[in-house]
Every structure is written in structure tokens, then in C-alpha cells.
Image (cartoon, coloured by chain):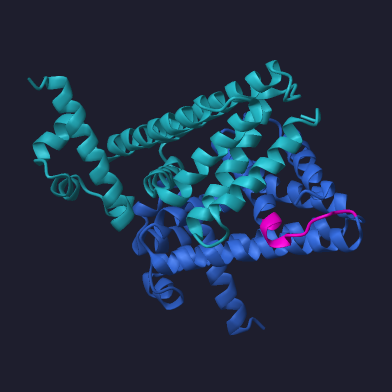
Chain colours: A cyan, B blue
């Protein structure tokens, strides 16, 4: 038996995937509920049943791709046996989103553009960033507890680690051939380990 | 006597400034040539004389804010007397754009959203990023020549320096109270100097 909640979950996934395709093809400015309903192969009534408007869908899409990334990072980090390897796993999982999956940055670039004039979406974006920093802080804290990392200001350092991964991901998104993913990973790791292990942070 | 070229330059500046205000208030999706003409206080005919469409204006706005940033960076870096101080000056100039001026990131976030589905704008964005990395590469190269920095892959390191500055700027743009500008500058400097002086890059 298929439960109602499962149907809702399936429909939501279907709509979000269609949203990502529409964003990549036409951009948020050309996104309409009508086009989206057609792309998702649902009726406009069904679309409106799940989402009030295209802003609500953009917010849901951001949460969806962030959940995906977080799950990938958790899976990679969970298997690593020390602080260095956990950092490496985290960097690798994040950069692989930039080089292999368009969805994440497609949604976030559309979202950022809207945050400039939409306080609700700006708040959702801030919440996503806090969540990312929090996940990074946990990796740093365990590294400190194990004696590998020497960091006094974990919160600020989390922002710094996120900045490096974000900044390189952006450039790789803009320019696929900028450098090999493996080189980018190694470089980020060397940069960040130097900081995390030095006692300067 | 006011020359025709000066008038053109003034009009262009006026239109670009109006574009930034429109982007911050309504976003690119709500930007129309009609609204923009009203905001810039020029006729629609005059607007069309200078720019073909709103994409052309977005491209010009990106170039304009990038020129501004580059001039600020050059002024700060030019006065610094060694490699460390030049790096610090560059970081400070870039982060001050994120904390004090909305224009730069307003334009770039609107631009990025459009690069997803507009190859011309994507090419302009890539060109801007290459230009930024090139400016950073010069600072690194002089530091290497002076014996302060030990970097073998200057191109890759330029991308890394840009990533740090970009990534922190983004978070400061999203969340003004994330950390004080001075702390952010110090942290970026410590992170990057550790890498640039270590011989690991």
C-alpha cells in the first residue's frame, strides 16, 4: 500500500527535480508555475497544493540540495578514522558537488540573486549557511578533542573552512577546466591543515 | 566645453548606478528597460541608445563594479612596502567591498544567476574571474621574486587566494554580524600567509 505521505514526498521530489531543470535551462526569472507544472508533469492544481508560489519552491529546492550534500558529507566523513582524513573527506564531498552535480550551485545561485530583495529567502539562505558551519564545527571540535587540530575559535574557523570550499567550488562551477578536482582537493587540504594544525587559529 | 564622449560616460555611469539600485530593490527578474529608464531618469530611447537590453546592462554593471574593486585594490596594494603587507592590503580592500559596499555583490549575484542559462554572461563572468586571478598572481609573483613567498604553482595559488576572499565575502554579505571585518581580515591573512610562506604550495 502506498501511503499519502509517501505520495506527497514523491510529488515534492518530482517538483523539485523539475525546478532544478527549469532553473538550469531558463533561470528563475523565466520560471512560472505553469511551466513548472508542465516540466514536473503534474497539474497546476497539484503544484499549488504542494507549493504556494515559485519562491516557496526555490526555498524547498535549496533545502533539498543541502540535505543531499549533508548526507554525502556525513557518509564520507563517517568512514574516516582520524581528523585529517575527516577533513579530506569533507572537502572531497563538497568539491565533488561542484564538479559532478549541477543541481546544488544552480539552486544556490538562483537563491542568492533573490536574497538581495527577498527577506524570507535571505533568512533561508542564512539558515543553510549556519547549518553548514555547524557541521564543519563538529569535524573541527572532534579534531581538537583528539589533539590533532589546535583551534581556539572554532566558530570563526568553521566560517573560514566553508569559505575555502565555497570559493573553490564557485570557480570550478564557472570554469570546469580551471584545475583537476584532485588538485583542488589537495590544495584546499594543504591550506586548511596548515591552519588547523598550527595553533594560529 | 563638455565633449560627447564625456556625456556618454556620464550617462553610462548614471544608468549603471540605477541598475544597481533596481537589482537591490527588485532583482534582475523584475528589471525592465522601462523601469530602469525611469530610475536612471533618462528616456527609454536614450537607454536603448547606450544598451541593447538588460543583459547588456548587467554585463556593463559587472565590468563597472569590477573596475572599481580593481582600482581600490591597486591603490591599497601600491602603498604597501613588502609582500606580506601587499597581501594584507589586497585582502582588506576586497573584504571592505563585502562589508561596506552592496553594489559589487548585488551585481555579481544577479550575474551568476543568469550565467546558468546565458552563455554570453557566463563568458563575461569567467573573464572577470580570470582578471581577478591575474591581479592576485602578480602580487604572489612579486612576493616570490622578493623571496618572501615560496610558491611553485602561482596560477593555482591565485585561485586559492581568490576562493578565500570570495568565500568570506559571501558569508559577510549574507550575514553582516558573522564576525568583525578586522577579525575576518586577520584570519584570511593568517591562513594565506601560512600557505604562501611554507613552501607547500
Q: Where, quadrant-wise, is the N terminus of chain A in this rendering?
A: top left
> For residue A163, which quarter of the picture?
top right
Q: Is residue B178 left or right of residue B18?
A: right
Q: Nearer the viewer, residue B10 or B1?
A: B10
Residue A172 in the image, given as x and y percentages of width and height = 52, 54
Does B155 lie within the magenta span? yes
Q: Is residue A148 left or right of residue B82?
A: left
Can I make out residue B83 in this image? yes
Q: Residue at x 36, y 64 (%)?
A: B33
Q: Nearer the viewer, residue A146 or B4?
A: A146
Residue A5 in the image, given as x and y percentages of width and height = 17, 21
The boundaries of the magenta stretch are B148-158
Can I make out residue B71 in this image? no
Q: Is residue A174 left or right of residue A5?
A: right
Does B64 lie within the magenta span? no
Q: Nearer the viewer, residue A86 or B13?
A: A86
Q: Residue at x 64, y 66 (%)?
A: B131
Residue at the top extreme?
Answer: A145
Q: Where, quadrant-wise, is the C terminus of chain A in this rendering?
A: top right
Q: Is residue B152 left or right of residue A67?
A: right
Residue A114 in the image, given as x and y percentages of width and height = 40, 44
Amino acid at each position: 500500500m502506498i501511503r499519502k505521505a509517501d505520495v506527497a514526498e514523491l510529488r515534492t521530489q518530482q517538483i523539485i527535480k523539475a525546478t532544478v531543470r527549469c532553473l538550469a535551462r531558463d533561470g528563475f526569472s523565466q520560471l512560472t508555475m505553469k511551466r513548472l507544472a508542465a516540466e514536473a508533469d503534474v497539474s497546476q492544481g497539484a503544484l499549488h497544493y504542494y507549493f504556494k508560489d515559485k519562491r516557496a519552491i526555490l526555498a524547498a529546492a535549496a533545502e533539498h540540495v543541502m540535505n543531499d550534500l549533508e548526507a554525502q558529507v556525513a557518509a564520507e566523513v563517517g568512514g574516516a578514522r582520524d581528523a585529517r582524513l575527516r577533513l579530506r573527506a569533507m572537502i572531497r564531498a563538497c568539491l565533488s558537488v561542484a564538479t559532478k552535480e549541477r543541481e546544488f550551485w544552480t539552486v544556490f545561485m538562483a537563491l542568492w540573486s533573490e536574497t538581495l530583495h527577498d527577506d524570507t529567502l535571505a533568512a533561508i539562505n542564512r539558515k543553510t549557511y549556519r547549518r553548514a558551519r555547524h557541521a564543519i564545527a563538529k569535524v573541527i571540535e572532534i579534531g581538537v578533542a583528539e589533539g590533532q587540530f589546535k583551534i581556539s575559535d572554532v566558530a570563526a574557523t568553521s566560517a573560514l573552512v566553508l569559505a575555502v570550499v565555497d570559493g573553490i567550488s564557485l570557480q570550478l562551477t564557472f570554469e570546469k577546466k580551471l584545475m583537476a578536482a584532485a588538485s583542488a582537493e589537495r590544495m584546499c587540504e594543504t591550506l586548511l591543515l596548515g591552519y588547523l594544525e598550527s595553533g594560529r587559529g
